[in-house]
Amino acid sequence: MSAYLTRYPQEAGLGDEDPATVLDRYHTPDYELVNDGVRLDRQRLLDHVRPARRRATGLRVEVEQALVDGDQVAARYRLIAEMRRGGTITTEIYMFGELAADGRLRRVTQATRGIPG
């Protein structure tokens, strides 16, 4: 789980590879993310990732806890983004999810909060 938390944001947010290819590597076709009560399907997630590539110059993830129990996962971590126009955005994330049989994420529910810089 820690590897996913550190690799996926880097590959999706800063990589040269097509964001859809990156998304599909880590998530099932029916992947659903509920972030702070807002449901994001595959297309809405891609719509979020593409502009983020233009705004961020660096991403770092600090994993506090990551647990896997069968097909259930949970994590507490911080995503730190260095912005092109200056400044840093730090977000604390509490994530709970379900894995598919092939190890990719099928569903995630998460709550976030911004950490003042």
Image: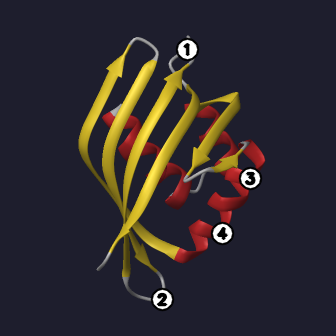
Instruction: Tell me which amino acid carries mark 4.
Output: Pro
Q: Earlier in the sequence, mark 4 or mark 1?
A: 4
Q: Which quadrant of the view contains residue 54?
A: bottom right
Residue 81's x, y, as percent?
Answer: 40, 69
Q: Which residue is mark 2?
A: 85
Mark 1 crowdedness (10 Å alpha carbons): few <14, some 14-19, many ≥20 = few
Q: Earlier in the sequence, mark 3 or mark 4?
A: 3
Which is nearer the eye, 59 or 38?
38
Q: Position of residue 59 (x, y in %)?
A: 39, 63
Disc 2 from disc 1: Cα separation: 39 Å
Between residues 32 and 8, which one lies in front from this camera angle? 32
Q: Which residue is mark 1?
A: 102
Q: Residue at x 44, y 20 (%)?
A: 72
Q: Which mark is residue 51?
A: 4
Q: Is residue 75 above or below residue 59?
A: above
- Residue visible at 44% across and 79% down in the picture: 83
Distance between the alpha carbons at the discs numbered 3 and 4: 12 Å
Amino acid at pointer 2: Arg
* Foreground tag (3 vs 4): 3
Q: Say left or right for 84 vs 37.
A: left
Asked which secondary structure carries label 1, the reply is loop
**Image position of 48 (left or right of 88):** right
Q: Quadrant of the C terminus?
A: bottom left
Q: Mark 3: which amino acid?
A: Arg
**Which part of the image, by quadrant, shows the N terminus?**
top left
Residue 108 in percent (x, y) is at 54, 36
